[in-house]
């Protein structure tokens, strides 16, 4: 048996030898083909930390749409973009999060998922810094990291349906006084006055209209027209006043008068210096996020224009509050922080209330503006713009509020426009002071340089322009049309004048000549416009506490422009405030003060 096994082994070895491809042998399966080298591609996982950084940068910029686009498919199916945005906004607003910073700390990355740790710090207006370490989970979806969103990414304490609640402590708003401490705006108990036309006594109607006109800053004839055109049972809104003013009205016509008590932020004298003080209004929907992030509750009245707006931080004081986390049942879980309120400050203006009142009365019948500056300081003693408006109408509880619609829709008179600082007008002959100064500064003119001031100015005809006429010519034509004669100083040509007398006489031809002469004959094309800029025209005065416009001073580009500019016409646009400032500079020896309306 053993011999048989050896025999079989020898036969197998022989067969294997016969199948070999050694020299002289015949391959059994032919020549083998070598296999190709395998191709291996390595795909790196995307940068998870970069994704988190992008997400948090979007949060820093309130770009909730960009954040939502970075959510995983499952997260987007679980919450709509609208609810996502609302959730973040509500939390940030409740925290009073004015800004935030973050730092990505570390990451753990797998091919299909990642975890990134980061530190976030919310800088809040009311409760200081809130700092949390948070872990964000991400999914790899089609080669991009997507955020697995849950509410704990805002604050870990919000997990499980918890909410943030701020308990606010709001200080009373500060008052506004004139330079002598007389109240201009203050929280007060006042009365809103109106009349019923059917109850007006015809015998005392004129006296009632006159008294209301004086009190409310209206025209007596307008009040009488309102009474005549209204139904007997209509309520005609007038204005607001005090108990003493009520007594005066009742003594005139007690049956026609109606009044409603109000405790409100009261703008005295139907809004004296209203274009300076501005007005307050409940925070609008468009302003809500901004003010909530500043620590406001959201239903406060805030400054919308003027001092009320620019000095909001002082007049409002600093809100206080306690920030809590509550469970779904409204029970307090924990307090995250708290702060005490800071009382508001009152503002004292440079305005003289009595001067302001009479200034407003002086221009009440006109459309225009007056600015009274203290020459040697730049303090604004009075700033009136007509027509004016009553800031009390912005009080929601005021029954006279119906007049607000008329006020806001008056696009012709634009009563909310502060013509003193925002109205832009050609300066006219006052600009001759600028041209006078530029002429002397050029060295080409002296105060005794003479020019014949006649009716006509013909020097522009060579440039294709018509003859220009002095103002005395226009007066003469008016006198002749009325059947008179041109034999007065306002209707006769001024004759030969030196430069100083030319300014006193306001001779148009003399100053047209200077503008044209500097531009065309001496290549001093920008002397006048540069002088105007040096006096502050065409730029903001820097008053800051009220809104203003810059106007414009444009370099002339041809002889006609230069001639028009010399008497403040053409492209010249200035504000009354700029004019008051530059004329004060002339009066004080050359110091151009920045106007100011806040004393302290």
Image: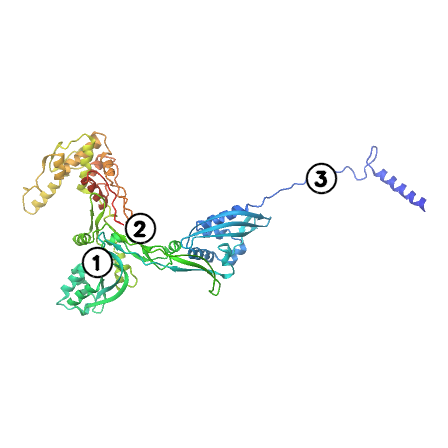
Image: 515 above or below 264: above
> For numbered disc 1, what is the local secondary structure?
helix
Pick whichever, 275 or 449, lies toward us.
275
Q: How many marks?
A: 3
Tell me the CA gap for discs 1 and 2. Answer: 22 Å
Q: Residues within 10 Å of mark 1 (few under 14, many from 20)?
A: many
Image: 399 above or below 428: below
Q: Which residue is mark 2?
A: 310
Query: Can residue 501 be seen here?
Result: yes
Labels 2 & 3 near each other (Cβ < 8 A): no
Quadrant position of residue 425? top left
Residue at 28 percent of width and 63 percent of height: 263
Q: Residues within 10 Å of mark 3 (few under 14, many from 20)?
A: few
**Viewed as shown, does residue 29 lie left or right of 459?**
right
Going from N to C along the chain, the mark reached first, 1 or 3, is 3
Q: Which residue is mark 3?
A: 35
Pick whichever, 431 or 426, lies toward us.
431
Going from N to C along the chain, the mark reached first, 2 or 3, is 3
Q: Residues within 10 Å of mark 2 (few under 14, many from 20)?
A: some
Q: Which residue is mark 1?
A: 269
- Coordinates of residue 346 in the picture (x, y in percent): 29, 54
- Coordinates of residue 288 in the picture (x, y in percent): 38, 56
**Viewed as shown, does residue 455 lie left or right of 100?**
left
Going from N to C along the chain, the mark reached first, 1 or 2, is 1
Labels 1 & 2 near each other (Cβ < 8 A): no
- Coordinates of residue 576 in the picture (x, y in percent): 22, 46
> For numbered disc 3, what is the local secondary structure?
loop
Quadrant position of residue 584? top left
């Amino acid at each position: 048996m053993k011999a048989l096994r050896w025999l079989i082994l020898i036969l197998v070895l022989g067969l294997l030898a016969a199948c070999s491809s050694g020299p002289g042998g015949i391959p059994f399966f032919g020549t083998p083909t070598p296999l190709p080298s395998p191709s291996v591609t390595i795909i790196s996982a995307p940068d998870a930390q970069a994704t988190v950084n992008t997400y948090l940068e979007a949060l820093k910029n309130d770009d909730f749409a960009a954040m939502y686009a970075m959510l995983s498919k499952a997260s987007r199916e679980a919450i709509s973009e609208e609810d996502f945005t609302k959730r973040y906004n509500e939390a940030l607003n409740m925290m009073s999060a004015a800004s935030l910073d973050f730092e990505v700390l570390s990451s753990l990355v797998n091919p299909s998922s990642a975890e990134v740790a980061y530190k976030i710090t919310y800088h809040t207006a009311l409760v200081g810094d809130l700092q949390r370490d948070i872990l964000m989970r991400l999914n790899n979806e089609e080669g991009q990291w997507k955020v697995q969103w849950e509410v704990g990414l805002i604050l870990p304490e919000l997990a499980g349906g918890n909410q943030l609640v701020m308990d606010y402590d709001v200080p009373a708003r500060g008052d506004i006084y004139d330079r002598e401490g007389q109240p201009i705006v203050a929280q007060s108990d006042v009365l809103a006055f109106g009349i019923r036309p059917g109850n007006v006594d015809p015998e005392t109607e004129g006296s009632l209209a006159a008294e209301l006109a004086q009190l409310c800053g209206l025209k007596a004839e307008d009040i009488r027209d309102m009474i005549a055109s209204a139904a007997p049972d209509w309520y005609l809104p007038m204005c607001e006043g005090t108990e003493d003013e009520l007594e005066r009205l009742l003594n005139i016509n007690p049956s026609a008068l109606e009044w409603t008590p109000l405790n409100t932020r009261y703008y005295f004298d139907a809004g004296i210096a209203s274009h300076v003080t501005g007005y307050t209004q409940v925070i609008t929907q468009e302003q809500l996020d901004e003010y909530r992030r500043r620590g406001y509750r959201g239903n406060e009245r805030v400054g919308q224009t003027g001092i009320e707006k620019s000095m909001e931080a002082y007049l409002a004081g600093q809100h206080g509050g306690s920030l809590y986390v509550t469970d779904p049942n409204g029970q307090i879980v924990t307090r995250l922080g708290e702060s005490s309120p800071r009382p508001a400050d009152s503002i004292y203006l440079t305005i003289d209330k009595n001067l302001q009142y009479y200034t407003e009365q002086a221009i009440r019948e006109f459309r225009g503006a007056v600015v009274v500056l203290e020459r040697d300081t730049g303090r604004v003693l009075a700033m009136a713009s007509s027509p004016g408006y009553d800031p009390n109408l912005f009080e929601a509880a005021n029954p006279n509020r119906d007049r607000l619609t008329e006020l806001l829709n008056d696009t012709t008179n634009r009563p909310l426009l502060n013509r003193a600082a925002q109205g832009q007008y050609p300066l006219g002959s006052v600009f001759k002071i600028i041209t006078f100064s530029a002429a002397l500064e050029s060295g080409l003119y002296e105060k005794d340089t003479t020019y014949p001031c006649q009716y006509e100015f013909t020097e522009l005809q060579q440039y294709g322009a018509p003859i220009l006429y002095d103002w005395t010519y226009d007066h003469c034509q008016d006198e002749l049309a009325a059947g008179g004669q041109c034999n007065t100083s306002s209707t006769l040509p001024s004759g030969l004048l030196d430069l100083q007398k030319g300014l006193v006489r306001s001779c148009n031809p003399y100053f047209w000549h200077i503008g044209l002469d500097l531009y065309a004959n001496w290549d001093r094309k920008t002397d006048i416009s540069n002088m105007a800029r040096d006096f502050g025209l065409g730029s903001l005065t820097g008053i800051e506490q009220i809104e203003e416009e810059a106007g414009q001073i444009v370099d002339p580009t041809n002889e006609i422009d230069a001639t028009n500019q010399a008497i403040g016409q053409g492209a010249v646009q200035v504000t009354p405030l700029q004019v008051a400032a530059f004329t004060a500079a002339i009066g004080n020896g050359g110091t151009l003060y920045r106007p100011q309306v806040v004393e302290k």
